[in-house]
Image (cartoon, rainbow, N blue to C red):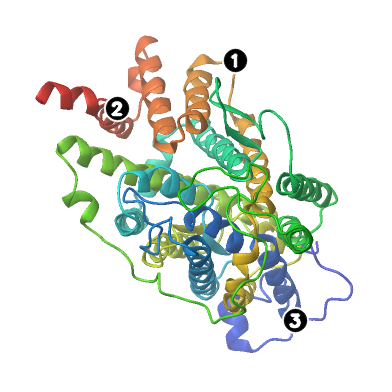
Amino acid sequence: MANPGTTSADPAPKTNKTLDGWFEITKRGSTIGREVRGGLVTFFTMAYIIILNPIIIGTQPDVQGNLITGVPVTQDGAVATSMAMVAAATALIAAIMTILMGVYGRFPIALATGLGLNALVAYTIVKQMTWPQAMGLIVWEGILITILVLTGFRKAIFDAVPRAMRAAISVGIGLFIAFIGLVDGGIVRPAVGTPVQLGIYGQLEGWPIAIFLVGLLLIVALYIRRVKGALLIAILASTVLAVIVQSVLNLPLMKDATGAVVNPTGWIQNLPALTGGFTAPNLGLLGRVDMFGAFTSAAGPGAVIGILLLVFSLLLSDFFDTMGTIVAVGAEGDMLGEDGNPPYTQEILLVDSVAAIAGGLGSVSSNTSYIESASGVGEGARTGVASVVTGIAFLLSLFLAPLVEMVPAEAATPALFFVGFLMMSQVVHINWEDPEEGIPAFLTIVLMPFTYSITTGIGAGFIAMVLIKVLKGKSKEVHPLMWVVVVAFLLYFAQGIIGGLIR
């Protein structure tokens, strides 16, 4: 039976024996042509991260009010510069790790900054520490995952968390990302009398909001027609429209230099206009990492426990995303063995864990395997050659990073909102009629967006899961690792009470 993606136009396999032997091109029924085609499809399907990651990582101030560049968020031009630097570093780290996956993991899967993981860093972790300290935690998370892979302990963690809770974490992160997309796109805003409201006093007004709506409609239209790279195409088309609108109307920014809203119908974060012309990529974010600052500056044991739980939350999100992704991509290409795992699983997981370390060192957040790689597999990719092609494409895109400055939030955030829809699909793996699954899953899902904290959602869900098991006399069903985790989360949530008692 022919592999999916094969066409009569595909040439017979003609490859160098050494290349063919290492990548197993002939053995997997592929050709160089199919691998190149599949690798390019994967790139265009996931290249949106070069634009979305700067929106998340590059625009948020840390606990000291500084952007990831170390410059105060209020400084003129600081956000635009920060976004361009994050874009460049995002493309570079994605290129290096995807090529490594192709050469060492020999699997058609690409890596880049993980959505959800970057949100956890930008909206939870840096509210408690500086950006270099937060990236230090990313590096520690990557080191821990690497140790788990090398020792084989990853399976124990995977087995410790029930499937329903793994699904709930994914869905919760999806809703959190969707909420961020709505807020950063100006669709949902602070209100008087209620926590939030629709647009401007309950109305959708202004050209920037119109750009968001056009972008979202375009994504939906392209997606339902199964157009490859729907998110990227929609972002680029919306940006072009925004640039045209701005050139005609010369709209202002919504906020002034102090952060006060002065033009409600203005652009949220940056003007859709290319200022300063094209410049070479700025890679100044590489290596801006403080490995120990988060721990040495922590005020007391309670704060240290809180930091460790932040690392645990990063590890948990990264870990299960990876396991689910490689199995899903392998299944798409009929590349799974009898054990349900793809070939060279250990090598694949090792590259993915190293990618988390690289993401921290590159100041772009943890890099992880992308489910969008399935699009390239659907196009015929079966080997690591496709990943090498995707990585080279990321490397070339590095020189387009300065163009990110002209992409307004209203053109990029519809993609964030739509990613929330994609992650919602995991909700079918939760049995809502069983309170043992439903209640912990519900707490996990709703508390992430409602508290603006992924860690809170995971902690509340785990505590509820164990508590319900105990109340039903099923404490023996709780994995020993979960008891440790729950005690840690209880201490995390009780920091304020404990601190009050000590004082």
- The front one of 492 and 466 is 492
Q: Residue furthest bottom?
A: 16
Q: Position of residue 228 (x, y in %)?
A: 77, 60
First reached walking from the N terminus: tag 1 or tag 3: 3
Q: Nearer the viewer, mark 2 or mark 3?
A: 2
Q: Is residue 164 left or right of residue 232?
A: left
- The front one of 14 and 225 is 225
Question: Label 2 vs label 3: CA separation?
Answer: 59 Å
Residue 190, above or below 241 = above
On residue 374, which mark appears? none
Q: SS for tag 1?
A: loop
Q: SS for tag 2?
A: helix
Q: Is residue 149 left or right of residue 306?
A: right
- The front one of 382 and 69 is 69
- The front one of 83 and 124 is 83
Question: Label 1 vs label 3: CA separation?
Answer: 52 Å
Badge 3: few (under 14), some or many (20 or more) residues near its Cα, within 10 Å? some
Question: Label 1 vs label 2: CA separation?
Answer: 28 Å
Residue at mark 2: 493
Q: Is residue 482 left or right of residue 169?
A: left
Query: As shown in the figure, which amino acid type bears the numbered disc 2?
Result: Phe
Q: Residue furthest right?
A: 8
Residue at mark 3: 13
Q: Residue furthest front?
A: 262
Residue displayed at 59% across by 19% down: 432
On residue 433, which mark appears? 1
Query: As shown in the figure, which amino acid type bears the numbered disc 1?
Result: Glu
